[in-house]
Image (tube, rainbow, N blue to C red):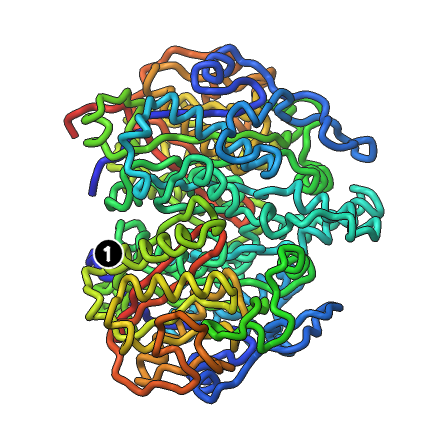
Amino acid sequence: MSQRVVITGKGIISSLADQADTLHNALCAGQCGLGSIGLFETQHMGGEVPSFDARAYLGDGNLRPLDRIAQLAASAAHLALEDSNWTTEMRAEQDVGIVLGTVFSSVHTIGTFDQLAIRRGPRFVKPLDFANTVINAATGQTAIWHNLRGINSTLSTGASSGLQAIGYASDLIRSGRISMLLAGGAEELCFETLFGFERAKLLGKRVESAVPFDAGRTGLIVGEGAAFVMLEDAEKAQARGASIIGEIRGYGTAFDPHRGQDADKLGMAMGMAIRAALAHSKLNIEDIDCISASACGSPMGDRCEAEAIAAVFGNQTASLPITAIKSALGETLGASGALQSVALVEHMHHGVLPGICGFKALEDGLYLPMAKKENCTIPMQNGLVLSFGLDGNMCALVLSKA
Amino acid sequence: MKRVVITGIGAFTSIGTGCQDFWKALLSGQSGISPVESFDTSKYAVHVGGEIKAFSPASYIKTLEAQKIGRTSQLGIAAAKLALEDAQVDMAALDLTRAAISMGTTSGEPNQIEQFDDYFVADNLQAAGDEMLTLYPCHHIAAYMAAELQFMGRNTMIPAACAAGTYAISHAFDMLRLGQADLALAGGADSFSRITYSGFAQLKAIAPERCQPFDKNRKGMIPAEGAGVLVLEPLERALARNARIYAEIAGCGLSCDAFHMTGGHPEEAGSVKAMENALFESGVQREEISYISAHGTGTPTNDMHETRAVKKVFGNRSGQVPISSIKSMLGHTMGAASAIETAVCALAAYTDRIPPTINLDESDPECDLDYVPNEAREHKVFAAMNNAYAFGGVNASLIVKKFKDAC
């Protein structure tokens, strides 16, 4: 067993694209995946995956047992398995694992199941739906669909779930418990989730309200999607002749016990997570060539993040390219950190970091000169992905280009 | 990698709280099954559950406002406080930035979505509270525990259904052996859920009166609630502070059937693999396993398949290993179950006593192993294995062994 964990494949389903290079091009062209929602009745904007049809990825099998989040996850998993060349035959012989990060999971299925019990009585509920009322249903369904018999785990840490799932999965390889697994996250757009954000008064009214670090931001737009990377023990990946596209150098986390009630404490936890990720990666701040920020258009959250980055990187902040993709894809919660990771690997491969979609002017008083609308063409070897839950959990992860 | 030991146990269950009361209740074979009170069961064919009837969250929750957080979080905090007290952890000497929490759950805070559903069906969502975002998602359980205790280290929730407790403990085990934390609270919690009850009732999986694992006339599982939290530390830290060590975590095995969402694999492929992987990772020999805490739900199929899986792994020794299911007493505490059962394995290794499988009246020819029927037993326990199986085809086996200073 080596201590190195490499990325051998990637798969995404997002409101802008279902291929990493198409997503990269769309982000570089300033395209936005946000708009009105067609899935259910609402006045709110969202980042819906337009006319999503899982059959395009999963074929004509019986998709009925899979709810929307399971279909999003299984589709992204299909793309990642294909990209990493883990064929059906290979999966029949070896146990591939999966770690899925999610926040609301199958909340819509869970609610619908219970509502039927209230309306018609408990004897009318559907057993098929009951299977999907556990929070790990999408992970289980994805494993059944793709015959993944290794470790099957689901991680919930709030908005950082997808990124922390990748970190957790890399530890499962480092501890020697498994050699290969899919790691990422998924989230579906649904009424229940939007209701929660609406009541918490965190939503931006218009698409333009949710631009990271922008002076005019007022709140986030909720999105959906799924993303996986295939992680493998480096030696075993090389031995099977896999094409290696990146490496997980390390990750760090921190928890803010004040849970976002105190901006200073929130920023401090963000900085702690970044420093922990650098230490775990055995890298210095000078080794970091770019950042994919967590910022989602939250007035306080984005400010704390900018301050945390400046606190850790000091003068280097002036020349450190930074992107933030949530004004293009929305706050995709459990999927967000995984989507950022796949996108950043692609940005580093192309040597172009996309500008921030819709960015007009940096908020007064923030020191983040590289936050801008324009793309940045620059060689990038090591990238830092940030995924911060404003209710407590901070995660930072360092990726390297192959 | 570092060795990891269990130095504290906090259980919050229908038959007892804390470590000693709970253990005493288990050894004396108490049942925590009673008529369901948290919702109206008149439209159901079954009416019993394993609810915790006397729980005053405010006596445990001091930093936060107890009434402003969900019941599962409340149970998690109560169990965490009991575990820290049991471990006699000096909080002032603890580096809070390296104090971690890893918890498991099946349903998180189901009461929150159930309340939403009531308002939704009544077409009265205006009257619903504002807490869907701040109380419902399951990561709040570990987060509120950390907020109460001011823990700033790694904080994770692993919703791996009824194997969640073991998955969460294995995650904490990894954090500690990889040097990512100094101390971890690890376990599982679930509160009594109408949704879970409706589902199992519809599957006709709930027993009408008693939970009778491995009995010939067993009629099913009984949904329950509870929380179990362990204090885990690297061995050198535990020794340095002269802590009582219940047992050492030897290793675990995690697998997935990838076969069926709610039923097990017909050939027990995944459950066998989980046990074998746990033996391999821990380096413990089959002959050294002297107790198995069964998943033992009391459903006809689970108990039969689990018996077969044990036979496949332990061969002609399988009849000599005492196996018991504490679900006969507690019912199925869902995401908390395998955490509480890991605590039971640690206590068995520490005290050389094994809790019984109660309600075992008539043996089943298909379940013909030693299930420690009805009476606790004194038995030298060198290493104990805990098995857990879950929706999603998730399997987990974890081995703890009696602590000996020399490796």
* Total count of labels: 1
Identify the image quadrant of residue A364.
bottom left
Image mark 1: chain: A
Which quarter of the rendered picture does the C terminus of chain B lie within?
A: top left
Instruction: Kindly identify the residue that appears in the image at 52 percent across and 85 percent down.
Output: A31
> From what the image shows, is residue A58 above or below residue B143?
below
The residue at the far left in this view is B406
Task: Give the side of residue B108 with respect to residue B291, left or right.
Answer: right
Q: Position of residue A402 (x, y in %)?
A: 25, 75
- In the rendered view, would you say A68 is above or below B75? below
Is any part of residue A92 visible from this angle? Answer: no
B31 vs B94, left or right, is right
Q: Is residue B365 above or below residue A189?
A: above
Q: Secondary structure at mark 1?
A: helix
Q: Give residue A228's position: percent from left, percent from top.
A: 43, 67
Three-letter residue code for mark 1: His
* Residue indicated by mark 1: A280
- Nearer the observer, B299 or A7: A7
Is A335 left, or right, of A253 in this rendering?
Answer: right
Where does the N terminus of chain B fall, quadrant-wise?
Answer: top left
Image location of residue B141, percent across then percent down: 51, 41
Q: Residue at x 41, y 57 (%)?
A: A165
Q: Nearer the viewer, residue B286 or B198?
A: B198
Q: Position of residue A201 (x, y in %)?
A: 63, 59
